Image: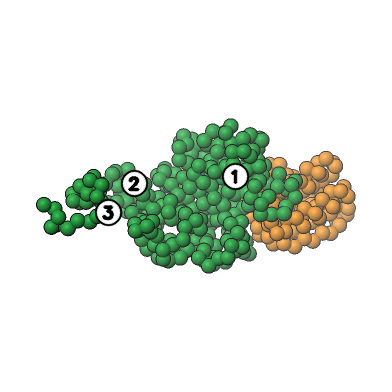
């Protein structure tokens, strides 16, 4: 898994790629929690994620819950098919704020 | 499945020329079986067909008399204890009885593999556990004890525990046995969704025909310890083999009867084969 972050007019774009599994999810959680503690608006681009397991999904859930408490934005963007299928399995596609593209999320 | 780098090769399971004996009695005869990645393989057969013995081999609980079993590319006969432990984290098993710990809550039962095999923080473990409870439609039941659940709920909780580590390979032993048709069907649907969403390879051992035809990509029919057929649902349904048709139509088959052997069994003398000279 690779994590890249960049600031786009005050919104942090987190771009994930590769496999988000047990061996990487702790790193993802740590990065997302740092951003949540800084009360940043965050868009997570998932277009290049080839596999995500439930430990990766757990990190996204925890960050989303914290964003809601902080009243900041936390958006999942450009879901790859593997990510979409896993979110649908747990019906989380009805919970997260999801956009078709990172650009749309950054504009919104 | 869409990419797990730990996976290599075409098959999740490769069984080659597997023989098994219980004492002098041969249970499995030259069993060959390959399970492709991302497919649901149903192993079916009547009582005594050897399907449970085969499952125990796939789980590494039995050692072959001869032949070998490869799981996720690993030869079970050559694994060190550490490698065997590693392999267990990549597989999940939902046992027929559920095999939940009666002294632990449902949530703790499901979280157990994560606590044993990972160093994830408790917040993540909690979310993962509740996610799986959502997936098996047991949301909100995490604090109940196993004794407080119905049979169908126990099966679903066992399935949640089996998938909590997101295994590459899942084994389900009689997942719908003893359940009413509606609950059984919901478990079938769940197994299909796990294959489609997670790309799991799934081996289901069952004698439930409705379930078999609903979920199987391929079926392995065992009969008296031998693979009678290994094919798609359509091909098995269309088979003209009388033993398969009997199985599908739930017809019993008259076993061949050796009158002499039968009498010896009744007289409690089966261990002493007798020749004609003694039969006077």
Report x, y in % for residue A67. Answer: 81, 44
Q: Which quadrant would the N terminus of chain A be assigned to in this image? A: bottom right
Near mark 2 (Cα within 10 A), the count class, few <14, some 14-19 or many ≥20, is: some
Which chain, by letter, is orange?
A
Q: Tell which of A16 and B71 is nearer to you.
A: B71
Left/right of residue A102 with respect to residue B181 in the rendered view: right
Residue at coordinates 65% horizontally, 47% vertically from top-left?
B112
The answer to whether residue B242 is seen in the rendering is: yes
Which chain, by letter, is green?
B
Give residue B160's mark. Answer: 1
Secondary structure, mark 2, is helix
Q: CA distance from mark 3 to mark 2?
A: 35 Å
Report x, y in % for residue A14. Answer: 79, 56
Q: Mark 1 against mark 3, which lies toward the viewer?
A: 3
Left/right of residue B37 with respect to residue B45 in the rendered view: right
Give residue B271's mark. Answer: 3
Give residue B248's mark. Answer: 2
Label 2 resides on the chain identified as B
Label 1 resides on the chain identified as B
Q: Tell which of B259 and B11 is nearer to you.
A: B259
């Amino acid at each position: 898994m690779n994590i890249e972050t960049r600031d786009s007019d005050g919104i942090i774009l987190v771009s994930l790629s590769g496999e988000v599994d047990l061996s990487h999810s702790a790193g993802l959680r740590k990065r997302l929690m740092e951003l949540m503690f800084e009360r940043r608006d965050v868009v997570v681009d998932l277009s290049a994620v080839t596999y995500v397991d439930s430990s990766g999904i757990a990190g996204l859930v925890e960050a989303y819950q914290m964003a809601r408490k902080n009243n900041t934005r936390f958006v999942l963007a450009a879901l790859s098919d593997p990510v979409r299928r896993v979110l649908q399995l747990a019906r989380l596609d009805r919970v997260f704020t999801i956009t078709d593209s990172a650009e749309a999320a950054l504009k919104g | 499945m869409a990419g797990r780098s730990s996976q290599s090769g075409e098959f999740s399971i490769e069984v080659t020329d597997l023989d098994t004996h219980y004492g002098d009695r041969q249970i499995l005869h030259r069993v060959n079986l390959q399970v492709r990645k991302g497919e649901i393989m149903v192993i079916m057969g009547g009582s005594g067909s050897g399907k449970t013995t085969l499952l125990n081999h796939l789980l590494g609980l039995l050692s072959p008399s001869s032949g070998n079993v490869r799981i996720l590319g690993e030869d079970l006969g050559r694994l060190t204890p550490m490698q065997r432990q590693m392999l267990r984290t990549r597989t999940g098993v939902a046992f027929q009885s559920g095999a939940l710990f009666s002294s632990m809550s449902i949530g703790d039962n499901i979280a157990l593999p994560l606590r044993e095999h990972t160093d994830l923080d408790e917040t993540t473990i909690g979310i993962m556990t509740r996610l799986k409870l959502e997936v098996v439609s047991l949301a909100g039941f995490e604090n109940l004890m196993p004794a407080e659940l119905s049979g169908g709920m126990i099966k679903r909780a066992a399935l949640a525990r089996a998938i909590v580590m997101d295994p590459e390979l899942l084994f389900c032993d009689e997942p719908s046995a003893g359940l009413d048709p509606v609950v059984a069907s919901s478990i079938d649907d769940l197994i299909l969704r796990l294959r489609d969403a997670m790309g799991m390879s799934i081996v289901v051992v069952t004698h439930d025909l409705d379930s078999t035809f609903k979920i199987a990509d391929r079926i392995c029919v065992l009969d008296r310890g031998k693979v009678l057929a290994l094919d798609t649902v359509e091909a098995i349904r269309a088979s003209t083999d009388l033993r398969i048709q009997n199985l599908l139509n739930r017809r019993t088959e008259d076993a061949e009867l050796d009158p002499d052997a039968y009498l010896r069994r009744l007289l409690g003398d089966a261990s002493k084969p007798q020749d004609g000279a003694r039969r006077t």
